Structure formats: C-alpha cells, structure tokens
Image: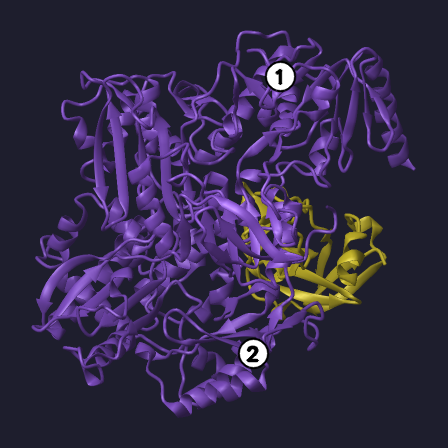
Chain colours: A yellow, B purple
C-alpha cells in the first residue's frame, strides 16, 4: 500500500518538469505493440511500445479499480485515435494521453513522459 | 499558488449566488433522495441543495445489496461518488442524522447540534425493517437486512455460524436467503402466510418457486408463526406456534418495512395511522414547504416499497421545484420482475385475477419448474395480469400488453404455450409510442424511437447515456436493445454486428477474409482490412480466429492475446496465476497425482479440484510459471488450456469398465475426444462430457456437447450450458456408433467455430440460429449444405497442427524471458500478499480505492 500512496502523490508530468530521465531498458526488450513493467525506486511503471504508431507511453502499473499491479500486462489500442490500455482484470480502459478512465467512473491514472535514445527507453520523473 | 486563487474565485462566486438561491434541504441520502438530486439539477441550477444522510456513505444501490456477498464491494454499489456531489455543487453530509424540524423558523437540527435553514424541505427518510414483537428478538445473532452495515454484521457473525434462518418469505426475505446461502450457511426461510411472496404470487406459483429453492438447498417452511426466539444469551433455536422448533445459529428478520416518519410526526406533519408521511399527488405534505418521497411517504393509504415508484415521486417533486405541475403521482403499477437466486419471478397487472369475470389460463410444468398464469378479460380481448415463475422472458411484452390494452390474439393461450420468444419482436412493433419501457426512469417507446431516428443514436450505450434508460434496475435492457434493432431496421439501416471501431466486419466475415487472403497475423489483417491501432475487443477476437483457422502457436503474437492467453495461465485476484494441467477424461494415475502434489507443495500453490475433473493450482507468480511447467512437463503433463477460449475438459463417469450399470466405456471415449480436440480454439470456451449410461453421472446434458451411452451406441446432445443461464443440451442424433459420433462432433464444432459471434457459447449460438435445432441437424447430420466433408477436413487440419504451448515456452529461452514481472529487474512484485485459510494460502482481498 505504501507504493500506492507514493504513486498517488505524483502529479501529471510533462517533459519540461522532468528532472530525471531514468534509463529503463533496451527498446528490443519490449514487446511490439505491447507493454512491460519497469521498476523505478519503489515505483512500478507500465511502459508501452506502440510500434504501429512509433510512439511510447508510460503510466502507473496500478489499476485504480481493484488496486492491482497489472496495467503493463494489458492490451493496448486506440479509440478514435487516442492511445489507451485495457486492464486485464475487468477491461477498464485508460487514456495514455490524459490518464482518464475511458469506459467507467474510475480514478485517473498517472502518466509519465517517455523518450527513446540510442536504442534505450527513458522515463521522465520529477524526482 | 495559481490553483489556490482559482478555488477561491469559485467559492466566492457560489457564495454570491447563494444569496439569491433558494435552499433545498434533502433529509435522507438513499436511492430516492439521490434520484431527487439528480432530477432537480437536470431541470434547474437555481437551487442550493444540501443533503443530510444518516449512513456513513453516499447513496448506494440497495436493490442489489445481495451482490455484496457475491464479490461486489461497497464502492461498486454507490450510485454516485462523493466527487459527483461536489461537481454538482451539492453539499453532502453523511453520518449526520436530522433530529428535528422547526417549521416556523424553517430550520432543521442534526444530532451534532447543527442548525440549518431551508426554504424547501424534502423528506426522503426511507423505511426501516419491521421487527415483530416476538419474545427474544433482542438476542445476539438476530439481524435485519437493510443497510451495508447490516451486511457487514451478518458477514462477521456468519463466520461462527452454520445454520441460519430468514423470517419472512417476501421479496427481500428471499434476497436475504440468497445472501446467507452465499455465505456458506445452511439456510431456512420461515414464512407466516401459507405461501412465499404472498403479495406477488399465488399458491401454485409459490409451490413451484418453493420447489426450485428447495432444489438449490434452501429449506422452505410456510404457515409457520414464530412464538419465541430461544437461547442462552445468543440465539439457539426458534419455537413455532405449532409446537415445533428449529435449531439455528443466526436469524435475519425480513418481515416488512416501516416508513421512517418519526421526524415528520414530531414536527406535527400529517402522518398515516399505520405509518408514513401523507402526501398529495404533487408529493407535498401537509406543510406546503415540505415534500416527502420514497418509502417514507404514503399516497392514497399506500406505502410503495419498490424503487420505481420512489423514483417517480422524485421526478414529480423535482418538477414541482421548477413550477411544473403537469406530472403528478397517482399511485403506481407494482408489476415486478426479478431473478431470485437464479429463478425468474414476475408478477404484473391484476396478478391474482381479482377483476370481475377474469379468466385464468395456467401452465403448471412441474418437471421444468415453470409456472405461467395469465388472466384475461371475460370477452377474451384483453390481458389483465399474470404471474410467471421459472421463465419470465415474456414479462416485458405481457406487462406492456396490460398497460397499453393491446388486443389479445385469437387464441390467447398461444401466448404461454410454446416458447413464445419468436413473437417478441412482433409484439414490440405493435406497442404504442406511449408504452413505458423503462419503469425506473419512465422512458417510453416514443422517447427511445425519437433518440434513434431524430438524434442518430445507434448504440445501446448511446441510448443509455442520452435517455438514462436501463440505468436503474437494468431489467428493460433486452427490450431497449430490441427496440433499437427494430427501429434501426425500419430506418433502413443494415444492422450489422461489426467487431469494433477498427474493423467494419462481422466475425464471420473476418473468418472468411483471413482464410481466403491467407492472413496469418493481426497486424497484417489490421493493415489490409482495418483501421487505427486495434483494441481489447478486436485483438483477442482476431487472435481466436487466427488460432481457429491456422492453429499456429499463439505465443507468436503474445500482445494481441487476452492476458490469460498471453501468459498461458489464468490471472487471479492479486495478480498471480493459476495452472491447470490436462487430465483427460478426469483419469489420472496415483504417480501423476503425487507429482502434482509435490510440485504444488514446492511452489506453495493453493490446490482445488475443478468442476471439470482436474486440479487447479493457484497463486503462481508470473516468473514461476515456466519453472512450474517445466516440472509438470517432465512428469508427462501438458497444457490444459484452462486459460483459453478453447476446449477445456471432457468430463466422464467411470462407465462400463467399473460401474455395474455402465453400458459403454465412457472413460476411454472421453479421453479419446479430449485428446482429439485439445488446444482447439473457438469463439468461447468449450466443454464436453461422456456418460456411460442413461443415469448421466457425467452431466453431459449441461455441456456444449455431451455424449450418453445407449445399448446400441451413443446419443449426441449439443449446445447445453451451465453458468448463469443454464440450458439443457438438445438431442442431435441417437444411437450412433463411435466413428459416426466423432465425425458429427467434428462437423458440429467446426460449424460453430466458423459461424458464431465472438464470446458466444454454443447455447446462445443455437438460440439465435434461424431454424434452430432442426436447421442445425439438417446441416450437421443430413449435410443439407454439402459442407460436411469440408468441415471434417478443416478439423483434421487443426488437429494435425496441435502442439503443447507450454512445451514450446519451456524449451525456448526467448519465450521464457517474457515471464517476469519487471523488464529491468529480476525482483518479484512486492505488493503480492496472501492470507491463510484452512491450511492453504489465499490472495488478500481486493483493496479498496484510497479516495473513498
């Protein structure tokens, strides 16, 4: 639960506020059009490789519906162009652009900026 | 800093406004109190709304309280979160009870001593459970069934109890009985009157219902008056007026409701002699500044103990606040349909045939537990009311026929003889525009048709959003859906079940496209036939199609699979997985049993026997899965595909090899069939069974395909289903030899795989099939379409491509590496937590969201 609380205190991030670019893993370690979970300090971050769009997104790994650490295992896709992830448990979907829950009244999730350099994936944190 | 200023501005703004705004205080935050707020803000923003609720949480769905026991948590039941009240500028005070009203000063005072001024007051104080004055009801272990707190107490107390009784066999009492049953208690229902649900159903209907409930393990005692609740401190037994007694550990009283009118009474409002705040047709009490709605109110000497009339009163009251008196409350049709413990019960119109000259037509089918009664007018022209038990699928239609006085067909008995479902569409067409479809939200057929034809709403979700239909009890959903389909069709829309926004094709069309164009991957299908990036609907659907057509290992495209297929295991509460090796036909050697025991013990897995005669091992971390499977495979096991929309198990009884009654070797045939179709992926999971004789111990008639031995060979049944809507399998062909039987199953399964919609079980597939079983028999047995050979050939190809998915993973370093929680660390998920029960581990319960 500690991790949960810490995650909750994270505010929505943008690249300007990033203080730390955390080198997470190699691009080739990630599945295509899918996600994996990155450990950063006490946090679990779900990182998604949208290979079709050549885009990357990151969000908290915790699904706020039943407080399960699983979003990285969810299927990704889009709705009217907006990238999203579906929680494997009950298929609650969340926008990876805004963190909003798209198909239910769940809390928003935290999202994080991602950049790719020299074959490595970096996630941006404010601390 | 910026944010603070912003908040301040909003507050100041609302403060200024409030000088001009009228203050409405709503006393009570139950379902009806909440509905009033919702209706008022939808009509006017000119009021300042303040709500006092005595319970600790915002209004929740009391109608579905018993779902709390089957896994829902308190938050799931909330009608709206606290955030909703904030967003709509409604001040909500929970855990704060209004204790007095000063009508001269127009103030209320709460138990905290706070005084608040109102311009208008709405009393939505609801009702409390009536506890009859029986000696000993104050004992420990006696509960009422009304609030979430009651449920918490019942749950807590039940842990030390084995046998429970519910006093009261009415609607709520039977709900409570279900809850107790869900808690694992032996449950009795005690009813004072000679029948169950005396207000809704008649004697014969009650017998059918009682019989069904008895089959489910609930003991029913009617005609029982309770004299005394006996015990030493806590309750031990009930003593009845007939001299008998019943030993129990806990008692839940559900003997009716009493309107909460004490506040109204103390402030001098007019209350009814038998309880309840008297209101007029505008829901106004004897004080023109005070309204009363819901179960606390009495209109025309009647308390309305259902949610729909409460919502209707909320609507009338909300309109009053905007000066709209066009709608009044004039009593309410108490017709009702519900599913009690899995048994449909409906009662509508003049259910008991009280009207002069009313003629009942009754079907009483004891074998199938179905009772249908319709009361028709003396001249045979109109339906007046009726009762449906066991099958209430025609309720909506019948109810509308009563309300709208739709003329009966020439042979009114045809309404209840036969299945009658085919007529439903025709019935809908004849409904007038004014026919009320959603009783909770009072939505007419005309409202729905208007939104569909004028506002271009073309989906069920769209209708829900725009009209709020189906958002109350949900009972009207099938009818709303049918109206949507009919209206769209009448507008010339082709109603096509496309997969999702990314593919404008049906599953069957995609099946053909994939096959003809020889498409092997999701990405190439999306490139050629779809658009966008896909989603959680089309990805697994296409994955299933690809597997059903090419049967290539699903591990080649892990990210389009549902999580269970992606990790080749079943995700469980807490995020760990369960592992099910195949035990074909349920036959296993002692050595293999010991191997499972050893492996489960080594990895500390919870073990349980499944319904399909195999063993499920729960609680494996994702990184442990390959190791566990490596050991299982070394012991000679292979994947059981419990994670896939695929063939699961073929259950069997021991048959002629051991059983003195058996006429065929059911185990050998079950093992043969299970090995033949293992790994076969389909639109939904597939289950089968083989019974060795007519006694049917393998329960083959509840399976997608079931085989029952006869003296001459096998009878093949198809399209049965257990689950939430059980359906018996239908006899496709009888007395066929083993080879023919297998060939017909090949055809049947392949035909299902090629033509069913995604996530449709065989039972539903058959129910929707034009021509039904006769047509299916023509295609499969008599080969009327000439596709029999092709279907068999397709099946042979699929069988030839079978590989154990887990064996491939275990042998591949690359595939194994995908089974880790973190991509950048070998650590495991530190948030996993378990509790112990009966000597095994269980996942800790769902955590609730910290916000609420």
Chain bearing mark 1: B
What label sits on residue B838 in the rendered view?
A: none
Which residue has dot 1 on it? B318
- Mark 2 falls within which chain? B
**Residue B195's image quarter?**
top left
SS class, disc 2: loop
Mark 1 surroundings: few (<14), some (14-19) or many (≥20) residues within 10 A: many
Which residue reaches farthest bottom?
B591
Q: Residue furthest front?
A: B243
Q: Residue at x 82, y 15 (%)?
A: B17
Q: How far across and down, in percent of the image, does residue B32 sit?
A: 60, 28
Query: Residue B832 appears at what percent x and percent y?
Result: 67, 69
At 43% across and 82% down in the image, what residue appears? B807
Marks 2 and 1, the one that precedes in the sequence = 1
Say whether residue B132 is left or right of residue B369: right
Who's the residue at 62% across and 11% down the image? Answer: B320
- Judging from the image, what secondary structure is the residue with disc 1 in? helix
Residue at image position (9%, 67%) is: B735
Can you give x and y, in whole percent of width and height, for residue B792 in the image? 18, 66
- In depth, the one of B42 and B191 nearer the eye is B191
């Amino acid at each position: 639960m500690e991790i949960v609380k810490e995650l909750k205190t994270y505010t929505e991030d943008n690249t300007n506020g990033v203080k730390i670019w955390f080198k997470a893993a190699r691009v080739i370690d990630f599945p295509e059009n899918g996600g994996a979970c990155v450990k950063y300090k006490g946090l679990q971050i779900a990182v998604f490789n949208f290979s079709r769009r050549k885009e990357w997104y990151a969000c908290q790994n915790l699904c706020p519906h039943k407080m399960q650490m699983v979003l990285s295992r969810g299927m990704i896709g889009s709705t009217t162009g907006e990238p999203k992830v579906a929680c494997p448990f009950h298929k609650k979907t969340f926008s990876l652009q805004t963190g909003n829950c798209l198909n239910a009244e769940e809390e928003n999730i935290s999202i994080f900026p991602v950049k790719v350099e020299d074959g490595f994936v970096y996630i941006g944190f404010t601390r | 800093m910026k944010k603070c200023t912003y908040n301040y501005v909003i507050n100041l703004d609302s403060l200024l406004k409030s000088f001009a705004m009228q203050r409405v205080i709503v006393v009570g935050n139950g379902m009806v109190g909440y509905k009033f707020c919702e209706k008022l803000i939808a009509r006017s923003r000119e009021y300042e709304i303040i709500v006092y609720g005595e319970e600790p949480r915002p209004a929740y769905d009391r109608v579905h309280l018993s779902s709390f026991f089957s896994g829902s948590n308190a938050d799931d039941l909330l009608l709206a979160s606290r955030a909703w009240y904030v967003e709509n500028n409604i001040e909500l005070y929970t855990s704060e009870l209004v204790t007095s009203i000063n009508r001269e000063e127009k103030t209320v005072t709460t138990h905290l001593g706070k005084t608040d001024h109102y311009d208008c007051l709405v009393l939505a104080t609801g009702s409390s459970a009536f506890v009859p004055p029986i000696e000993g009801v104050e004992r420990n272990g006696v509960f009422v069934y009304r609030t979430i707190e009651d449920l918490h107490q019942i749950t807590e107390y039940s842990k030390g109890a084995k046998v429970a009784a519910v006093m009261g066999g009415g609607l709520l009492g039977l709900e409570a009985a279900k809850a107790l049953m869900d808690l694992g208690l032996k449950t009795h229902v005690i009813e004072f009157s000679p029948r169950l649900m005396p207000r809704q159903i008649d004697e014969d209907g009650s017998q059918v219902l009682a019989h069904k409930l008895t089959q489910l393990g609930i003991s029913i005692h009617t005609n029982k008056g309770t004299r005394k609740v006996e015990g030493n401190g806590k309750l031990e037994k009930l003593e009845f007026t007939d001299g008998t007694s019943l030993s129990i550990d806990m008692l839940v009283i559900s003997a009716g409701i009493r309107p909460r009118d004490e506040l109204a009474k103390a402030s001098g409002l007019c209350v009814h002699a038998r309880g309840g705040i008297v209101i007029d047709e505008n829901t106004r009490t004897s004080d023109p500044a005070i309204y009363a709605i819901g179960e606390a109110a009495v209109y025309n000497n009647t308390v309305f103990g259902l949610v729909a009339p409460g919502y209707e009163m909320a609507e009338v009251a909300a309109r009053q606040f905007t000066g709209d008196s066009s709608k009044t409350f004039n009593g309410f049709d108490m017709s009702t349909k519900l599913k009690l413990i899995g048994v449909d019960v409906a009662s509508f119109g003049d259910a008991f045939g009280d009207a002069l000259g009313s003629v009942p037509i009754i079907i009483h089918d004891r074998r199938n537990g179905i009772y249908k009664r319709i009361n028709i007018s003396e001249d045979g022209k109109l339906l007046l009311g009726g009762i449906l038990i066991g099958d209430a699928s025609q309720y909506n239609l019948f109810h509308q026929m009563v309300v709208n006085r739709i003329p009966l067909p020439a042979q009114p008995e045809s309404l209840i003889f036969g299945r009658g479902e085919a007529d439903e569409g025709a019935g809908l067409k004849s409904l007038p525009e004014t026919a009320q479809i959603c009783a909770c939200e009072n939505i007419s057929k005309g409202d729905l048709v208007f939104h569909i034809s004028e506002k271009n709403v073309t989906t069920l979700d769209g209708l829900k959003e725009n009209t709020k239909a189906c958002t109350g009890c949900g009972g009207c959903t099938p009818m709303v859906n049918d109206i949507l389909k009919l209206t769209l069709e009448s507008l010339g829309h082709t109603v096509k079940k496309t997969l999702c926004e990314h593919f404008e094709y049906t599953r069957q069309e995609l099946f053909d496209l994939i096959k003809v164009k020889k498409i092997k991957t999701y990405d190439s299908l999306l490139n050629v036939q779809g658009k966008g990036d896909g989603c959680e609907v089309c990805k697994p659907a296409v994955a299933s199609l690809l597997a059903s057509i090419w049967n290539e290992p699903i591990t080649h495209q892990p990210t389009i699979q549902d999580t269970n297929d992606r990790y080749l295991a079943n995700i469980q509460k807490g995020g760990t997985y369960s592992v099910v090796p195949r035990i074909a036909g349920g036959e296993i050697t002692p050595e293999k049993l010991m191997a499972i025991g050893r492996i489960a013990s080594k990895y500390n897995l919870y073990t349980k026997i499944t319904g399909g005669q195999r063993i499920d091992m729960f609680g494996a971390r994702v990184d442990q899965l390959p190791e566990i499977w490596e050991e299982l495979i070394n012991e000679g096991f292979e994947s059981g595909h419990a994670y896939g929309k695929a063939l699961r198990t073929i259950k069997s009884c021991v048959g002629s090899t051991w059983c003195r009654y058996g006429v065929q070797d059911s185990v050998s045939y079950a093992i043969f069939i299970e090995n033949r179709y293992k790994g076969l992926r389909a639109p939904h999971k597939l289950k089968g069974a083989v019974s060795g004789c007519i006694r049917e111990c393998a329960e083959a008639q509840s399976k997608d395909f079931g085989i029952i031995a006869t003296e001459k060979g096998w009878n093949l049944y198809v399209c049965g289903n257990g689950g939430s809507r059980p359906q018996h399998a239908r006899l496709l062909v009888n007395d066929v030899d083993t080879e023919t039987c297998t060939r017909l199953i090949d055809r049947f399964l392949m035909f299902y795989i090629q033509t069913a919609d995604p996530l449709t079980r065989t039972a539903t597939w058959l129910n929707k099939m034009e021509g039904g079983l006769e047509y299916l028999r023509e295609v499969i047995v008599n080969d009327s379409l000439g596709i029999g050979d092709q279907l068999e050939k397709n099946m042979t190809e699929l069988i030839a491509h079978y590989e154990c998915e887990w064996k491939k993973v275990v042998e591949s370093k690359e595939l194994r590496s995908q089974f880790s929680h973190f991509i950048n660390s070998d650590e495991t998920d530190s948030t996993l937590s378990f509790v112990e029960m009966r000597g095994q581990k269980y996942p800790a319960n769902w955590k609730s969201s910290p916000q609420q």
